[in-house]
Structure formats: structure tokens, C-alpha cells
Image (cartoon, helix red, strand yellow):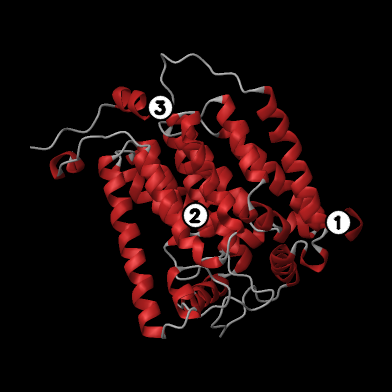
């Protein structure tokens, strides 16, 4: 006989990242100093030596927004590889949202404005994490030492924005409207966070799932008069063309790595699907067997590693399991901080990092009763 779902009040208590009985732990001054100085130095250095790669991906976003303003096509049709220079692959509302930055004169350096927004988003994500103060400082220090984070900022990638939205979703676990809106924003930004909608359903957060679904539909509908239905059809065609291959150069998904190490396409694809199936099983079990905070972090990591097309900067999401494990297990769990820092290692390590991130978030979770079909239907 399965256990009934937890009542809202009990669930809120069970899902809390901290024990109410535990007194606040002040951050050690040395940790605070390192967390301030190291990210400034490493970010400054990576931007200083970036050269022509500074804002490399952002230029694709900016060009898309400018094409939209000029009445041109947002997407290149017939593309079969995500490695094409300047390829814009995000949903049409992203181009709409970037129009204000595209309107900035060159004298205001739109690229630097965008990079500043990404750094602010990363800082905001750290502040939003519902963890103890010393853990926030530790996460900020880890971010400053992590190649995927620094690389995402250098390229102008949206990873820091996505981490901010995941952090807000974590903070707003039991506030349906803010939680739903953060899920919707993440989905519109990069599609993969749509996995949080079934997560919300599985954990009994029906209102949040409804808010997320409604907000996604409203944003998509509101964009049609601006971008036209053709842009949406072109985007769907583009995603179908480039999103199901393991043959993209420099990708770090298991299938792409296997292909690069000499496996043929059939074997590499089989390896990729086996990895996706394993991640799906772990994620669904997390929805049913772990507390909501832990299962949310599992889902966030899963959303970034289940596609055949995975770039190394996707590993910025590993900051979330670092925060969860350190907050729940304390300083003795410091080796988990090495997880994203290991992103400096060669590409074959990345599937391992994502797998360990999933396992760490699962391991730090608290058990919850299985949800019966009768409860789901109630």
C-alpha cells in the first residue's frame, strides 16, 4: 500500500533546504574574500584574452533581433548541424526580448551590456538559492573557478540566465504563480526546462504547472503578431534538423563523444539513447521518491544533458547540485564542489560530470512516499 501525498504544510517543511532547528552558520571571512576576489580575477582574465570570441554566441542573438527589426527571416532553413557559425536556434520570443539591446548604439557596446546582464544574472542566481549564507559564498567561489561558467559568460551564452530561473524555481517551490512563471520563462528561453512541467505535476504542484503552461501559451501567442507564424514553423524545422544528431563537432553528449572516439554512428546513437533512458529513469524516480527540492535539481540537470546535442557550457547547471549537497550535508561534502570545476578536463569527462550531478542531487534528497494513481487522480 502506497503512502498518501504529503499535505502542503508538511511538504513545505519536508522540502526545506535547511533545518529550522539549526542556527545560521556565518560564512568564514576567508571564504567570503575568496568568493569575491577569485570570480573577479578569473572573469576579468577570461574576458581580457577572449579576443574575437568575446560575445561569440551573443552576436547570433543580436543578429536575429536585428533581422526581426528589418523584417528578415529569423532562422536559416535547411541547416543540419548546430555547429554553423552565427546560427540562431532559440524560440522566436527570445529574439523579441533582445530587440531593446539591438536598439542600443554601438557606442554603448551592446555586447558588453549583455555580458554585464549575464554576470548580474549569475550573481542573482547565487543570491536566490534557498541555502545557508556560507553555501552561497561557496557556490560563487566555485562559479569563479569553473570553465563552463566562464566560457558561457565569454560567449554571451544564456546559461547564467537559465541558472537564475532554476534558482528562483527552487526558492519558490511552494508559491504556484512565481514557480510557474519561472518554469515558463526557462522554457521560452531554452525549451529544455519544460521538463519542470511534468515535475510540477508529479510533485502535486498542479497550479504551478497550470500557470507555466498558460504563460507559455500566452507568450507564444503574443509573439505571433510580431514574428509571424512562419518564424515558428521555421524554428520547429530547424530544431528537428539539428537536434537529433550525435555528429556535431565538439559536442559533449555520450553519443558524440563515442563517435569522436571511433564508434560508428549506429553504436554512438545507441549509447546516446541508453544514456537518455537512464537519465529519464532517475529523473522520474526522483519525482516520485525524493523531496521536491532534490527532484527539482535532478530535473534541472537532466534537462541539460538528455539531448544528443550538449555543449560544455551546459554544465553551468551543475552549480545547483553543488549548492544542494553543501547545504544539506555541510562542509564535509566539499568534494562535490570539484564537480563543475572538473569541467576544465577534456570532453569525455562531461557525461560523467552530469551523471555525478544527478547522483549527488538524488543522494542529498530526502525520501518521500510514493504517489498512488488514486492520489494523482484526486
Left or right placement of residue 286 versus residue 262 in this view: left
Give whichever of 56, 268 is nearer the camera: 268
Give whichever of 156, 39 is nearer the camera: 39
Say if 309 sits above or below 361 in the image: below
Residue at which label 2 appears: 187
Q: Position of residue 229 (x, y in %)?
A: 54, 71
Residue 222 appears anywhere in the view: no
Question: How far apart are the alpha carbons under marks 3 and 2?
Answer: 25 Å
Quarter of the image where one finds residue 286 = top left
For the C terminus, give its image quadrant: top left
Image point (36%, 84%), residue name: 266
Question: How far apart are the alpha carbons under marks 1 and 2?
Answer: 28 Å
SS of the residue under disc 1: loop
Say if 314 sits above or below 292 in the image: below
Question: How far apart are the alpha carbons under marks 1 and 3?
Answer: 42 Å
Q: Position of residue 373 (x, y in %)?
A: 15, 45
Q: Earlier in the sequence, mark 1 or mark 3?
A: 3
**Mark 3 Cα within 10 Å, few/some/many (few <14, many 20+)?**
some
Q: Are marks 1 and 3 in contact (CB under 8 Å)?
A: no
Circle number at residue 109: 1
Image point (36%, 81%), residue name: 267
SS of the residue under disc 3: loop
Amino acid at each position: 500500500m502506497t503512502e498518501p501525498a504529503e499535505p502542503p504544510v508538511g511538504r513545505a517543511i519536508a522540502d526545506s533546504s535547511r533545518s529550522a532547528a539549526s542556527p545560521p552558520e556565518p560564512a568564514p571571512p576567508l571564504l567570503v574574500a575568496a568568493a569575491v576576489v577569485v570570480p573577479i580575477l578569473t572573469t576579468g582574465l577570461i574576458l581580457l584574452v577572449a579576443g574575437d570570441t568575446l560575445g561569440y554566441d551573443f552576436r547570433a542573438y543580436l543578429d536575429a533581433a536585428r533581422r526581426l527589426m528589418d523584417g528578415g527571416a529569423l532562422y536559416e532553413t535547411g541547416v543540419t548541424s548546430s555547429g554553423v557559425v552565427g546560427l540562431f536556434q532559440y524560440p522566436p520570443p527570445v529574439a523579441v526580448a533582445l530587440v531593446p539591446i539591438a536598439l542600443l548604439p554601438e557606442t554603448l557596446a551592446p555586447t558588453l551590456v549583455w555580458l554585464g546582464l549575464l554576470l548580474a544574472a549569475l550573481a542573482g542566481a547565487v543570491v536566490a538559492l534557498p541555502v545557508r549564507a556560507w553555501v552561497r559564498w561557496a557556490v560563487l567561489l566555485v562559479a569563479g573557478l569553473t570553465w563552463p561558467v566562464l566560457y558561457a559568460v565569454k560567449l554571451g551564452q544564456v546559461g547564467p540566465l537559465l541558472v537564475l530561473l532554476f534558482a528562483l524555481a527552487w526558492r519558490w517551490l511552494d508559491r504556484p504563480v512565481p514557480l510557474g512563471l519561472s518554469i515558463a520563462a526557462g522554457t521560452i528561453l531554452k525549451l529544455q526546462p519544460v521538463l519542470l512541467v511534468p515535475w510540477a505535476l508529479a510533485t502535486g504542484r498542479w497550479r504551478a504547472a497550470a500557470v507555466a503552461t498558460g504563460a507559455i501559451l500566452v507568450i507564444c501567442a503574443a509573439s505571433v503578431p510580431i514574428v509571424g507564424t512562419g518564424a515558428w514553423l521555421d524554428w520547429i524545422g530547424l530544431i528537428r534538423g539539428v537536434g537529433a544528431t550525435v555528429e556535431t563537432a565538439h559536442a559533449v553528449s555520450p553519443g558524440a563523444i563515442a563517435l569522436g572516439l571511433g564508434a560508428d554512428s549506429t553504436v554512438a546513437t545507441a549509447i546516446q539513447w541508453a544514456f537518455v533512458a537512464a537519465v529519464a529513469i532517475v529523473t522520474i524516480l526522483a519525482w516520485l521518491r525524493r523531496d521536491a527540492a532534490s527532484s527539482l535539481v535532478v530535473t534541472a540537470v537532466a534537462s541539460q544533458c538528455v539531448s544528443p546535442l550538449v555543449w560544455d557550457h551546459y554544465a553551468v547547471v551543475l552549480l545547483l547540485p553543488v549548492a544542494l549537497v553543501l547545504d544539506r550535508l555541510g562542509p564535509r561534502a566539499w568534494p562535490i564542489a570539484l564537480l563543475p570545476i572538473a569541467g576544465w578536463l577534456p570532453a569525455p569527462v562531461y557525461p560523467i560530470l552530469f551523471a555525478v550531478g544527478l547522483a549527488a542531487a538524488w543522494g542529498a534528497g530526502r525520501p518521500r512516499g510514493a504517489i498512488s494513481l488514486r492520489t494523482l487522480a484526486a
